[in-house]
């Protein structure tokens, strides 16, 4: 159930604790007590426009986050309440504490999906023929690649005296190249290599051969086979007209609204706690008279 309204701010995704309206039901799931929205990798991406952080095998699975905590110091902690069983097996609202840095982020099983590298078409031409846009790149991209590979002398290899590239006024890319070990390398082609598995997919350049080769990192753990219980979702305190009871068929736990239970019992003509109290009063009066 939704307990917060996700939004995007310049500093990143936001999720703040917020109590949900009390359901107008005699019994309802404990999800209605949750103070935070929970996410899958897909719903996180849909809500915030970015992928959730990569799975961290050193942490428990966690589908919620609290952007209000102070995680500026490694030792900071934060306290919440959760639904759990006490030492006697009774379901209760129990306190628990966790590092603030962990509370501030999700840890959702699954693999990070990196956006595909999309090469926009171009109207640039050379000698009257269209230029393959895969050879084009932005100057900032070319500069970054040249520095990463320790290249030198960035230049537009289409700026030639004979049959130069002709770029439209709205085309910011150029056919950038730089020198690497005495050879000219086209940065557009290098980017095609680097982003073959998506923009931002981890890897490194192998320069042991005659040309740089992008080597993708092995897939990291996804957590999909992690059998540890997840971090519980923090909950609000029970209201005065609520109590925990076993779930349907005795499995799990749910919340009972005692006021609606009493109203339903009266409507059905069932023997209620009020009836029991009245009988006790009558028995006490009769006992006094008999004495």
Image (cartoon, rainbow, N blue to C red):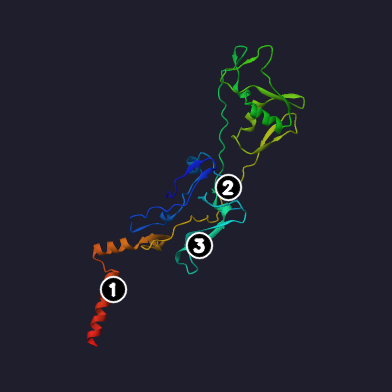
Q: Residue at x 51, y 41 (%)?
A: 9
Distance between the Cα atoms at labels 3 and 2? 26 Å
Judge left or right: residue 145 versus residue 82: right
Q: Choose the circle earlier in sequence order: 3 or 2.
A: 2
Q: Choose the circle earlier in sequence order: 2 or 1.
A: 2
Secondary structure under tag 2 reads loop
Residue bearing the label numbered 2 = 55
Q: Choose the circle earlier in sequence order: 1 or 3.
A: 3
Secondary structure under tag 1 reads helix
Foreground residue, 97 or 228?
Answer: 97
Q: Count residues near mark 1 (Cα–Cα under 10 Å), then give few for <14, some for 14-19, many for 20+.
A: few
* Circles 2 and 1 in contact, beta carbons < 8 Å: no
* Image: 27 above or below 285: above
- How far across and how far down the image is residue 80, in percent? 50, 58
Residue bearing the label numbered 3 = 95
* Image: 36 above or below 242: above
Q: Count residues near mark 3 (Cα–Cα under 10 Å), then give few for <14, some for 14-19, many for 20+.
A: few
Residue bearing the label numbered 1 = 277
Q: Residue at x 47, y 64 (%)?
A: 85
Q: Count residues near mark 2 (Cα–Cα under 10 Å), then give few for <14, some for 14-19, many for 20+.
A: many
Q: Residue at x 48, y 40 (%)?
A: 46
- How far across and how far down the image is residue 39, in percent? 48, 47
- How far across and how far down the image is residue 131, in percent? 60, 18
């Amino acid at each position: 159930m939704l307990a917060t309204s996700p939004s995007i701010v310049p500093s990143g995704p936001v999720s703040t604790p917020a109590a949900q309206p009390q359901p107008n039901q005699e019994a309802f799931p404990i999800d209605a007590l949750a103070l935070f929205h929970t996410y899958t990798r897909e719903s996180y991406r849909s809500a915030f426009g970015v992928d959730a952080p990569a799975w961290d095998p050193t942490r428990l699975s966690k589908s919620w986050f609290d952007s209000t905590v102070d995680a500026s110091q490694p030792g900071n902690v934060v306290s919440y309440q959760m639904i759990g069983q006490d030492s006697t097996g009774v379901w209760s609202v129990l306190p628990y504490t966790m590092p603030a840095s962990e509370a501030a982020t999700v840890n959702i099983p699954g693999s990070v999906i990196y956006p595909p590298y999309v090469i926009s078409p171009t109207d640039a031409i050379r000698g009257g023929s269209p230029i393959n846009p895969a050879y084009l790149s932005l100057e900032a991209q070319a500069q970054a690649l040249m520095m990463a590979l320790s290249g030198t002398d960035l230049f537009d290899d289409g700026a030639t005296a004979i049959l130069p590239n002709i770029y439209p006024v709205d085309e910011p890319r150029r056919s950038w190249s730089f020198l690497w070990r005495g050879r000219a390398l086209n940065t557009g082609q290098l980017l095609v290599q680097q982003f073959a598995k998506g923009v931002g997919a981890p890897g490194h350049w192998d320069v042991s051969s005659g040309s740089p080769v992008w080597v993708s990192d092995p897939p990291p753990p996804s957590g999909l086979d992690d059998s540890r219980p997840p971090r519980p979702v923090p909950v609000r305190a029970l209201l005065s007209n609520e109590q925990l009871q076993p779930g349907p068929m005795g499995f799990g736990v749910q919340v009972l609204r005692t006021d609606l239970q009493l109203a339903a019992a009266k409507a059905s003509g069932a023997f209620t706690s009020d009836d029991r109290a009245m009988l006790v009063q009558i028995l006490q009066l009769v006992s006094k008279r008999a004495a």
